[in-house]
Image (cartoon, rainbow, N blue to C red):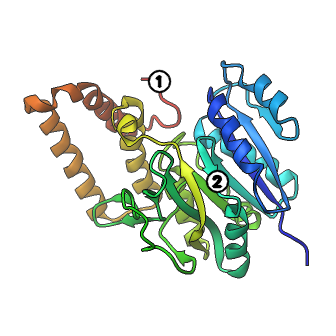
């Protein structure tokens, strides 16, 4: 019986240190049939030369510009398709993995013919027992998504067999290539954020399940505080939530509750003195809503 081949796609944009650590982590995998593609999104920190010299066995594709999370990973998916891979794995460059992580993911996907995609349990790198994601769920009543288990210490509450979830994060996203060929790649209108949610829904609607595999483990070097204070992140999260609702043809409750939440937040950040420091986020949020209404999608310059 042949072993399924996996192409691991890592996106690099001026993140040489993290990418090198991720590649070193992957070198310890116990899975025998994988190759790694690094897509460089126009880095200016000498990433390309350093990665090529340190890991000459890795395929390095230079995009020449910042294509965003969506464009860079779509380029990698096209390469995986040309290489005849059975699976593609999107993996953030700021992650490190357990040796058995890929084997556990592939085993779960191979055992379930209804599975279209799968993802591991993901921990915070700085607090290795604290969960960042154990899969995700969509709250269609309120029009938002949430990562299951975020902030919880892992006491075995998610142990057990792989289970279906509403969506998985693009941080570590294994997809069967026939499913990719059927549903297409990530939607470039998102550029970054919410693209994985929309992709999962397309996979669901094509008749496949999305699996969370707790036996597979990854650690993510993410800082919630840094993300929450970034106007750019807030812009894309605001605009793309609306785009997600549009793409998925969400019901009126989703739209009503989303705009109620946005309105309440903007009023609070405007009139309450304790939120005055959020002025840059308020500006980004207003711009995001207007851009969505005007149909200005894809990459945005703030």
Horizontal relation, residue 168 to residue 72: left or right: left
**Residue at the spot of label 1:** 301
The residue closer to the viewer here, 172 or 200, is 172
Q: Callout 1: helix, strand or loop?
A: loop
Residue 115 percent coordinates (x, y)? 64, 75
Q: Is residue 195 above or below residue 174?
A: above
Q: Is residue 45 above or below residue 219?
A: above
Residue 32 percent coordinates (x, y)? 85, 62
Horizontal relation, residue 262 to residue 38: left or right: left
Residue in the image at 37% along x and 61% along y: 152
Horizontal relation, residue 210 to residue 248: left or right: right
Mark 2–mark 1 Cα distance, whole angstroms, equals 33 Å
Give the residue at the far left of this rendering.
272
**Residue at the spot of label 2:** 97
Q: Is residue 61 above or below residue 108?
A: above
Q: Quadrant of residue 98?
A: bottom right
Residue in the image at 47% along x and 45% along y: 126
Q: Quadrant of the C terminus?
A: top left
């Amino acid at each position: 019986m042949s072993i399924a081949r996996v192409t691991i796609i890592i996106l690099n944009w001026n993140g040489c240190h993290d990418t090198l650590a991720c590649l070193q982590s992957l070198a310890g995998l116990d899975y025998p049939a994988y190759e790694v593609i690094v897509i460089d999104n126009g880095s200016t920190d000498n990433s390309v030369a350093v990665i090529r010299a340190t890991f000459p066995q890795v395929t390095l594709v230079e995009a020449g510009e910042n294509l965003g999370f969506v464009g860079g990973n779509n380029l990698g998916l096209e390469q995986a398709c040309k290489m005849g891979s059975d699976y593609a794995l999107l993996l953030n460059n700021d992650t490190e993995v357990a040796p058995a992580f890929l084997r556990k993911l592939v085993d779960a996907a191979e055992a379930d013919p209804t599975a279209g995609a799968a993802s591991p349990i993901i921990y915070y790198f700085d607090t290795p027992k604290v969960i960042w994601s154990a899969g995700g769920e969509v709250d269609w009543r309120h029009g938002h998504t949430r990562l299951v288990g975020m902030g919880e210490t892992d006491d075995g509450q998610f142990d057990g067999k792989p289970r279906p979830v509403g969506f998985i994060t693009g941080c570590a996203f294994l997809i069967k290539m026939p499913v990719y060929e059927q549903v297409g790649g990530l939607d470039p209108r998102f550029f970054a954020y919410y693209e994985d949610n929309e992709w999962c829904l397309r996979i669901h609607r094509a008749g496949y399940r999305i699996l969370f595999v707790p036996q597979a483990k990854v650690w993510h070097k993410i800082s919630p505080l840094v993300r929450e204070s970034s106007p750019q992140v807030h812009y894309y999260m605001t605009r793309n939530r609306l785009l997600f609702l549009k793409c998925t043809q969400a019901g009126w409750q989703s739209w009503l509750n989303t705009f109620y939440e946005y309105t309440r937040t903007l009023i609070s950040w405007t009139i309450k003195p304790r939120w005055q420091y959020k002025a840059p986020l308020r500006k980004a949020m207003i711009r995001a809503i207007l851009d969505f209404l005007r149909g200005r999608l894809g990459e945005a310059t703030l």
